[in-house]
Amino acid sequence: MNTRLDASINAKNGYKQVDARLLSDITVKNLDAQVVKYVFTYNFASAKFHKTLLQKITEFGANGTEFYSHEFSYYDDIPTCKLFEDPVIVNVPWTWILVAR
């Protein structure tokens, strides 16, 4: 297990729970012999909102050689990190309405 920089903290059950772990790999064994191993690679540096993103999963065979790997890509809908447009000045004619009671 690796330590993540964007730890999840909540107190929903009335006590503080911190999850600061990242799954680094999964090893499948049969009678203590490795059948397959999956290694997870994460990317924190380029993530928006400082969240850890899964970058790649690599599968290794029984002999330890790389069998397959898959890289993930993420849609970036905030490319410039600019959430709002520039302010626009709107001239509104002010009219005062007097209401008699």
Image (cartoon, rainbow, N blue to C red):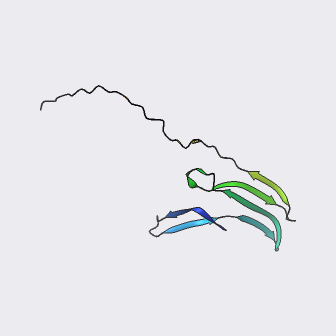
- Residue 2, percent across and down? 66, 67
Residue nearest the viewer, comparing 45 with 58: 45
- Residue 55, percent across and down? 70, 53
Q: Residue pushed farthest bottom?
A: 32
- Residue at 76%, 52% in the rendered image: 70
Total numbered circles: 0
> From the image, which quarter does the C terminus lie in?
top left
- Residue at 85%, 65% in the rendered image: 64
Q: Is residue 48 above or below residue 82?
A: below
Q: Is residue 32 above or below residue 100?
A: below
- Residue 8, percent across and down? 54, 62
- Name which quarter of the figure residue 35 lies in: bottom right
- Residue at 12%, 30% in the rendered image: 100
Residue 57 appears left or right of 33: left
Residue 101 appears left or right of 28: left
Residue nearest the viewer, comparing 10 with 90: 90
> From the image, which quarter does the N terminus lie in?
bottom right
- Residue 44, percent across and down? 63, 56
Q: Residue pushed farthest right?
A: 63
- Residue at 70%, 64% in the rendered image: 24
